[in-house]
Amino acid sequence: MAEDGREKERKQGGLKTMPFILANEICDRFATSGFSANKITYLTQQLHMPLVQASNTLTNFGGTSSLTPIVGALIADSFAGRFWTITVGSIIYQLGMMTLTISAVLPSLRPPPCSPQQPCRQASSLQLAVLYLSLLCTSIGSGGIRPCVVAFGADQVELQGEAGQKWNFFNLYFFSMGMPVLLALTVVVYIQENVGWGWGFGIPTVAMCLSIIAFVIGYPLYIKMKPGGSPLTRLTQVLVAAFRKRNVVKPEDPSLLYEDKELDADISTTGRLLHTNQLVFLDRAAVVVEGDIEESGQPRLWRLSTVHRVEELKSIIRMIPIWSVGIFVVTAASHSYTFAIQQARSMDRHLTPKFQIPPATISIFTVMAMLLSLAFYDRVFVPVARRITGKPSGITYLQRMGIGLAISNLANVAAALVETKRKAVAAEHGLLDTPDATIPISVFWLVPQYAIHGLADAFSSVAHMEFLYDQSPESMRSTAAALFWLAGSLGNYLGTLLVTLVHDYTEEKGDWLQDNINRGKLDYYYWLVTGMQVFNLGYYIICAMFYTFKPLEVAKPENPSKVVDEEVGAKEVEFSKVGT
């Protein structure tokens, strides 16, 4: 019987599951990108929203879509498991896409077109309600998909390969996601602008349906990790136990703290977290006092926690400063899909005398730059860096993230300079007061800022996700992936707040963010964001210098204990700890 179990385990997981998981995510990303990339145009041109309102609607929607993954992750890690959370989330997302597609097809669900005889009318309350309902469904659906796909895929494969491995899972994941985004930003956006919004939303909706089918078909092949119970409950129990024992004297020898391998078995299948000398006030949760253990020998978990559970909380707390850096990274890039697209719409977009690219398609240069950068990183940069540093990954993911943050500063510098140039050309041709006119300056002036964003993402976004997955407790991997999206959520909300504050403060002093961007001062806004990014980079450097990696002990029967520092890979070490 045991042999049959091992045989079944060997048949599950591994690279053979990647076509199903990545097919799901590729179709999903194609759908969401085609769905979202040009939505600023849909809101302003079809629903006749003012620019600031449309921008804030989209950033709020993006923020909510990145906030719900926390709920989805807790559901997956607590009781539902990743497979069923992804499946249900995908179905809810599908319903949201179908609702918006129907609203784009039925004339009664959007205001009538503008004409000389009929001024533009904004969407009615009913029409906005249908829009918000569709966005709510997609936001809830994202909560099930986003935090679980990365963790579920990483469950199937060996994350850290041999030194010669050309792709680790996170690079493969981000690279695979780039291809459908590229297709969506060209084909789907073109259809939306030139064929119709019904087809433009309908094609991504069909792709989302196919993604669900592909994912479910692979069910027999997946390794499905058993949920370890609510991580939020365990973290709360540690806090409560530590507070109750705030006056208890902590033993100097950490080996006297409470441990229970059997109790922690389901949440430490790859190994126990070892004691660290940071945040030592939490260690009191693992000090045994009278009344902590029942007559049956089981601990009262609201009074006593194991070292492993205490270290779970410490790991999460240690991650927060570096995690928070990602918030402003998203804020700084949020205008790329709102203001920058409006800039593109005002510029010469012709490739030939009869063909011009849609404004949102300019975003492909971010994706192209990210794809090329990921390929260069693994094929060229890592082998060269490996020879110099001796690390299998070439450089650590903290170093990689720092490089990405430094590069991203240049994107907004380029954006500010190009906007200054665009307005100068508009003034030269007397077009400052004709916002609908095409300014005789090529849209390809915007390419540098988009390409730099893509290059920065290849470093910072991949490293940020890998850091969160690697340094989170094993039983909280979905929650850790959700933290990545939570940073995006807070970043989008901060972007909304920043835009609102700038608009309100400057409204009577020139209005930097007015509907007529030719008279606005977008370049000033970009310089403001650049200054904030410089501060964010300095904050990150300080956090990275003082960060302590988690030590993990993996015990195997009849073998020495293996200790894994997940930043540098697994090493066989007899009863020792690794700290990077």
Image: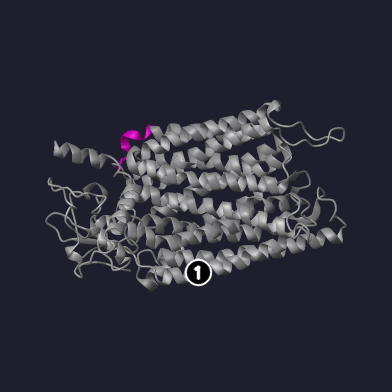
- When asked about the image quadrant of residue 318, the answer is bottom left
Q: Is residue 328 magenta?
A: no
Give residue 397's position: percent from left, percent from top: 42, 63
Q: Quadrant of the C terminus?
A: bottom left
* Residue at 66% in and 48% down: 55
Give residue 485's position: percent from left, percent from top: 48, 50
* Residue at 52% in and 49% down: 178
Tag 1: residue type? Tyr
- The answer to whether residue 257 is left or right of residue 333 is left
> According to the image, what is the colour scheme of the structure?
one colour
In the rendered structure, which segment of residues is drawn in magenta? 217-225
- The answer to whether residue 337 is left or right of residue 386 is right
Q: Is residue 367 visible?
A: no
Look at the picture and state if 310 lies above or below 192. below
Q: Label 1's element?
A: helix
- When asked about the image quadrant of residue 296, the answer is top left
- When asked about the image quadrant of residue 409, the answer is bottom right
Give residue 253's position: percent from left, percent from top: 19, 69
Q: Is residue 164 visible?
A: yes
Q: Quadrant of the N terminus?
A: top left
Residue for badge 1: 539
Give residue 212's position: percent from left, percent from top: 45, 33
Q: Is residue 224 magenta?
A: yes
Front residue (pair 222, 108) = 108
Number of marks in the rendered image: 1
Look at the picture and state if 91 lies above or below 74. above
- The answer to whether residue 269 is left or right of residue 318 is left
Residue found farthest to the front: 247
